[in-house]
Image (cartoon, helix red, strand yellow):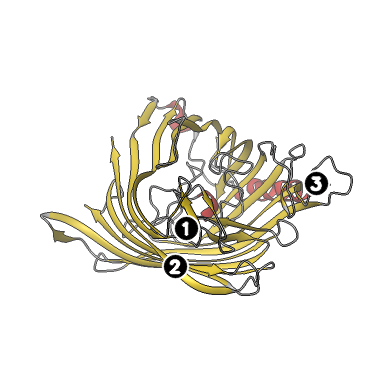
Amino acid sequence: MKNIHFLVLLITLLSSINAIGQETDSLSNKQQTQVFKSTFKWNVRAQFWLRHSNFNKGSLVNNEPTSHFTDISIRRLRIPISAQITPKLYASALFGDNNYNIKYDGPWIRILDFYAEYAFSKQFTMGMGKSGYQGLSRWNVRSSYSLMGLDSPLFPLNTVEKNDDLGRQFGFWLKGQAGHFDYRLSANQPKAVTTAPHGKVDFANNKPRWKTSTYVKYQFFENESNKSAYQVGTYLASKKVFNIGAGFQFQEKAFSDGDAQDPLTNFYDMQHWAVDSFLNLPLGNQDAITAYLGYYNFDYGKDYVRNLGANNPTNGVENGDYNGAGVAFPMMGTGSTWYAQFGYAFHPTKLFNQQVVIQPNIAIQHANWDALKDHMTVYDFTLNFLVKGSHSNKMSLGYQYRPIFDAITFTNTSYKGMAVLQYQITLK
């Protein structure tokens, strides 16, 4: 019974694919007879941060009380490697890590992705390995390379560093495109959690159950590539896209309110669903609009809330607010949230003797978590400068305005900010 959602959707989608997929296959017999040349690609990409933060009350940096802090770090390092081995066999690997900051102590380079896929047709591809292939929404598997917002959104990565590896898990998946429909179905094996919840609902320290998920979207204009698990944040003026999508995630007994070995412990299934839409609209003057709107319903278990802050340099908190240490805020929880994003890319203009695309954008997450008395609303403002209109050479100014909640009343009492200058570079 635990995988009934997955099986029903699998049967339905495969039936639809069989009916719709009578169109010409992208891997037709004619193409197969042509001379095939395998390809091998790789590059190195990094995001450097210069940041000033107004910390949450009681934050500690290396055990010293700190209210404001300026730091330099590498937010992300990525070394993607891919190979089209045969016309139907594809392999990909991704090495790197996140948050190379004052707390980082290795291992410096990790295996984030390593998987292989076999394309039976354009409508049906099967893959297996370690990857970010999951369902739920567009943004839970978004590309950090092409993000429009500086570092937003993070909340769709709803199990990050708890029972996964920076959002990745071992698993297998099916994906494909039939006409304007695009789908993915995945079954993932979460990492084992070794720390028992204490005093509140958290990830259960039991035998990990398989997580099933899906995401299906309908593409009204141009079709997006589904070669990678990670979906594009903004195409600027290069592609006309409008999609609507829906998805879910399910894992039995993923959460508990105590030790899994205690017979009095209550277990909770993880049940999430979402609907969303994405627009990337080039305008006649080489300007472009990028917009997103999504509604998410999260069920982790009774009154679950997780405070999280990006690239947090603190190591603890004393007598603090509900938010916890550093730049954390109640980013995830049982309840519902809206997420909206809007950006405008201006046509290329000459700046410092370079053709630069300037793209201001704003993002708002507005959540109603069951455990909190007030709504949780966080604002992200970003101004991108893309040299030659490329994400491979991009400077971004970002400011996050986060809510502070009282540890006793669970009400929103104030706001604090974090300002970041980011430089993203790709070496090819």
Q: Position of residue 268 (x, y in %)?
A: 78, 53
Q: In this figure, which residue is indicated by the disc labeled 3?
A: 2
Judged by depth in the image, the label closer to the viewer, 3 or 1, is 1
Q: Position of residue 344 (x, y in %)?
A: 33, 68
Q: Could you classify mark 1 by the number of other residues whose Cα lies within 10 Å: few (under 14), some (14-19), or many (20 or more)?
A: many
Decide if residue 230 is on the left or right side of residue 194. left
Q: Quadrant of residue 155?
A: bottom right
Mark 3–mark 2 distance (CA, rounded to whole Å): 42 Å
Look at 33% across and 34% down and name the residue there: 43
SS state under label 2: strand
Decide if residue 379 is on the left or right side of residue 131. left
Kindly tell me whether residue 365 is visible in this rendering.
Answer: no
Q: Amino acid at mark 3?
A: Lys
**Residue contact at pointers 1 and 2, CB within 8 angstroms:** yes
Q: Position of residue 206 (x, y in %)?
A: 77, 39
Mark 1–mark 2 distance (CA, rounded to whole Å): 8 Å
Q: Amino acid at mark 1?
A: Val
SS state under label 3: loop
Q: In this figure, which residue is indicated by the disc labeled 2?
A: 416
Q: Residue furthest right?
A: 263
Total numbered labels:
3
Decide if residue 297 is on the left or right side of residue 110. right
Q: Amino acid at mark 2?
A: Lys
Q: In this figure, which residue is indicated by the disc labeled 1?
A: 327
Q: Is residue 341 above or below residue 200?
A: below
